[in-house]
Every structure is written in C-alpha cells, then in structure tokens.
Image (cartoon, coloured by chain):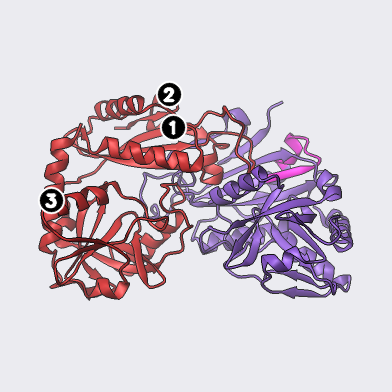
Chain colours: A red, B purple
Amino acid sequence: MTRTVYVNGEYLSETDAKISIFDRGFLFADGVYEVVSVLGGKLLDFAGHMKRLRRSLAELELPSPAEDDELLAIHRRLVSENGLDEGLIYMQVTRGAADRDFLFPPKGTRPSLVLFTQAVALRDKPSAETGLRIASVPDLRWGRRDIKTVQLLYPSMAKMDAKRRGADDAWLVEDGVVTEGSSNNAHIVTADGVLVTRDLSHSILHGITRAAVLRLAAEENIPVEERNFTLDEAKSAAEAFITSASSFVLPVVEIDLHPIGDGKPGPIAKRLRQIYIAESEKTAI
Amino acid sequence: MTRTVYVNGEYLSETDAKISIFDRGFLFADGVYEVVSVLGGKLLDFAGHMKRLRRSLAELELPSPAEDDELLAIHRRLVSENGLDEGLIYMQVTRGAADRDFLFPPKGTRPSLVLFTQAVALRDKPSAETGLRIASVPDLRWGRRDIKTVQLLYPSMAKMDAKRRGADDAWLVEDGVVTEGSSNNAHIVTADGVLVTRDLSHSILHGITRAAVLRLAAEENIPVEERNFTLDEAKSAAEAFITSASSFVLPVVEIDLHPIGDGKPGPIAKRLRQIYIAESEKTAI
C-alpha cells in the first residue's frame, strides 16, 4: 500500500510526491519541520507543535504556508486517508522554489508545504522496557538549535556513529556538558531524586515533550532543576532518560558503556512515561 | 526560455525538474555540492572540483553517483543544450530517497544527482571595479565547514543580514578571527605586502580558487602566510579580497564601514584577478 501524502495543496500517492529541484529546502536546507504523534487516530499536543512552528518561522522570517486550522485539517485528512491509528505526521515548510541565490527570494515567493505520515508503534516500544544504550558524540551543530531546521546531517551522522559503537542513540556533548540527544532532549535524575535537565537557550531544541514532562513531574512533586549537567554527572546519575514527540519518555540504562543506576530503567522515567501517555491520550484531538 | 537541467539520469525542462519529497537532501540536508564556472563555454578547474567532491563524499560516506568522466559529459551536455557561454554549473549529490530515518538508508540506496546551469556574467563584474563592502557576522555554522554540504541556511541568513546593513556580503567571525566569507574565502594584504589567509582546517571550506590564487601569488613572488587574522587586523589591512569559483577574485574596499587601504580596490587583488582569469582561460576544458 502506498501512502497518501500532501505536497503544496495536493493529496498525492507517495510515489508521485515531488518538489522542485530549486526548492530552497533542497538547495539551502532553508526550511523547518514538526513531527506530531498520533495515538488512537488522534493528534498529540497539536497546539504545542503549532506554537513552536510559528516561532521557527518567525526566527527565520519564513512566510507561513497556512493558518493553524488549515494545517489541522491537513493532518486530520492524512490520518483518515492513511487509516493511521498510531504513528507520526511529519510536516516541513521551506522558503519555496527560486533560482539559486544565497539571498532570500523575492517577497511573495510561495513557501513549500509537505506532510506525510509514518505508521510506527509508539506506546509499546521494546526500548521502553529494556532502556536505551547511549554513546556520547561531540556536538558540532550550528549555533541556533532552538530553531527546528532541516539541517539534520550532523544528528544523522551522530546517530550512525552511536549505532556503530553498539549503542541505540547519541548524546551530544559540548565543553564537557550534555546538550541533548540526536533528536530528543536529555535528562537525568540525581541520587537525591532531582530531575535535572539542560536549561533552554539557543543550544538546544525547546522540546514540546520536554515541557510537558517537566509540568507532569512538578505535579508529581518531583523536584526539577533546569541547568547544565556534565557527561560525568550523567554517568553517575541514579537515572537517565530522553523525551521527544516520537519516543515520549524512554529510559537510558547505559552511557558510553557505563551502567546508569542499577543498569535497568529507573522508576521515575517509567512513571513519567506512564503519566505522559495517559495525559496525552486524554488531551489528544 | 526554460533551461534544460539534469536529474537522476534525465535531461528535463527546469519546470519538470523534481525530486522526491523523501530525498535526504530535502529532509536532512544530507548532500554535498560543487559549482563549476564556465568561460567561453569551457569548464574552469573541473579536476579540482571533482577532487573536492570526492573528498566531501568520502567524509560523509556518501556513495558516488557517477565517475568523473560521466560527470564531465553531463556538464558538457548542459553547456551545449543551454548554449552557456559564461556562467555556472551547479551539481548536487544527496544520499537519495528513503523513508525518513536519522539512520542512513540501506546500502544500495541510489544517490541523487542534480545539475543545472546559471547564466551569469563572471568576467565583467561591476564589483571587480568598485570593490565589495563587507559586514561582519558571528560565525554560527557547524564544525565541519571543510565538507561542502547543502547546510547553507546560516550563510544565506548572514548574507541577508549584510545586505540589510548596506553591505554586499558577510565575513564570518569566530573568537575574534575571520573564518571566511558567506560563500567564499577571505584574504588580506598587510602593509608589508604579505598575503594573509586563514589556514586550512575543519573551520573553513578548502577553496579551489583559494588554492589556485595562492599558487599564482607565489609565482608572482607575493609572500603568503596561511594563518588566523582578526577582524581588527582585516580592518587595518592594506588590501582585502575574496576568492570563490563564481567570483574569482573580488576586492574588498570596506569592512563594517571602515575603508580598507585608501578605500579603492588594491593593486594585488586586481593583479590576482587578472592573472587568475588569464590562467583559467588557458587551462579550461
């Protein structure tokens, strides 16, 4: 079965889904994206993703391809056309097609809008039970990681590097401190039961799931500290975990071959995963 | 008149030239490029560009889309089909189309190959006479600028920023020292007549034109120092200029509103432009 995808106003078979070679997403990585999760055919935290999309567009002076309600309608139609019960909806906006020039194209150039679905098991993931093994990799990305651009070559290389070293994913390290995972936010729990997570800045993505989990942690009376933590502090933490729209909360059981805590998924990570899923299902639209 | 362009084995009208939305060039900026200049219908330093392409592909473990002689044949056919006398040929290679995953696609995934021409005046440029005004911009790019990837969003933003500040282009500055221009290498000439240019590393692109110009400078008995130089040193230099495949050598007459030398194109920059063009025409194929 081929998927139905959305490209600039049209619903097409994925095999016909193409964009111009002059699209600035292709030539300059001049585009941003969001990934919305789907559980039971419903969208998780759609409003949060739209808010971040608007911020990314504004930071890059990218024109808006459509209003939120139109984007919602496209998301819902793709869920319906593809019979998507559980998985992801990927959405990308670029500055559109124009003859190649480092200068932005003239005002009025139509931004490109592309969406497609991916059917993936999100709730019942083996790694939620076994935990993830992490390999650390130097963070060589650009200076505005708060903008969710498609400049994803380095995260892709970092994940490949981790995989080759026998790990499941990479944590990126800059000046000795952990910035984030290859495509997720990184968190630890100290021996005193404090959830420690990197504070927001231009250095990391402002994760939608990160924000939700911190809110839920506070409701559970788990103390939260938003600050830098070193790779060494992470290795000797009681627990570690990641958050992202597609992984929710996943425990980390090993960093650079050092077991975290007792080498099994920690209770706080497991609890946060559980309540994040329950809360998400309640509020999905 | 519409151009004929090349996309994955086919010669197409530019309006039909499309790639899959699943191309990793579009989704991950997972691709590299080269720009070859054309003078009198002939290619400038094709071998140099092929050598750098091979290096970029190797650094990213990108499969080769074709042998050098096939790529040469495509370049020549595009020159011929488009009647290109003077201008550029842009070539991009990506890791090909595959369902979205940070991990590289399976071995055997066919890389994408895209080429198109741009008719541009290269020899008689007004800026060769007037010189360029430069604005400095912090260098926020990733850590592997020696690989010629399509992660060009920041250089594009930097050039826009420079334009808005009334300048023609940007020089990127990191830790007080100049790395390079938005899409060219940066050079200065000291009061003693020494050509100073940033040394090669992961911090800058290994310019094909930079290398040719340094060789020609040596032949002209101009002393060359490959080392860091600060923005302040550049502002108080006797001359400044840029090099790139598409601009050859262009004098810089102003940096952040400070005139360079007497505020006019310097004799060494003018001389190097002249002999670079003469040499290029002699060796073009």
Of badges 3 and 1, the one in the foreground is: 3
Of badges 3 and 2, the one in the foreground is: 3
- Residue at mark 3: chain: A
Report the span colored magenta: B77-89
Residue position for label 2: A9
Q: Are marks 3 and 1 on the same chain?
A: yes
Depth order, front residue of A176/A26: A176
Q: Is B123 a magenta residue?
A: no
Instruction: Verify CB contact (< 8 Å) between mark 3 and mark 2.
Output: no
Which residue lies at the image location 83% right of the left edge and 44% below the top edge? B126
Quarter of the picture containing the N terminus of chain A is top left
Q: How far apart in space, not on screen, are marks 2 and 1 (Cα)?
A: 8 Å
Which residue lies at the image location 65% right of the left edge and 50% below the top edge? B71
Q: Is B87 a magenta residue?
A: yes
Q: Position of residue A285 (x, y in %)?
A: 20, 31
Q: Is residue A92 left or right of residue B241?
A: left
Badge 1 density bin: few <14, some 14–19, many ≥20, Cα 10 Å: many
Q: How far apart in space, not on screen, are marks 3 and 2 (Cα)?
A: 42 Å
Residue position for label 1: A113
Depth order, front residue of B74/A238: A238
Which comes before the other along the chain, label 3 or label 2? 2
- The amino acid pointed to by label 1 is Leu
> Residue B2's quadrant in the figure?
top right
- The amino acid pointed to by label 2 is Gly
Q: Position of residue B103 (x, y in %)?
A: 37, 55
Instruction: Verify CB contact (< 8 Å) between mark 2 and mark 1.
Output: yes
- Residue at mark 2: chain: A
- Residue at mark 1: chain: A
Q: How far apart in space, not on screen, are marks 3 and 1 (Cα)?
A: 37 Å
- The amino acid pointed to by label 3 is Glu
Residue position for label 3: A219
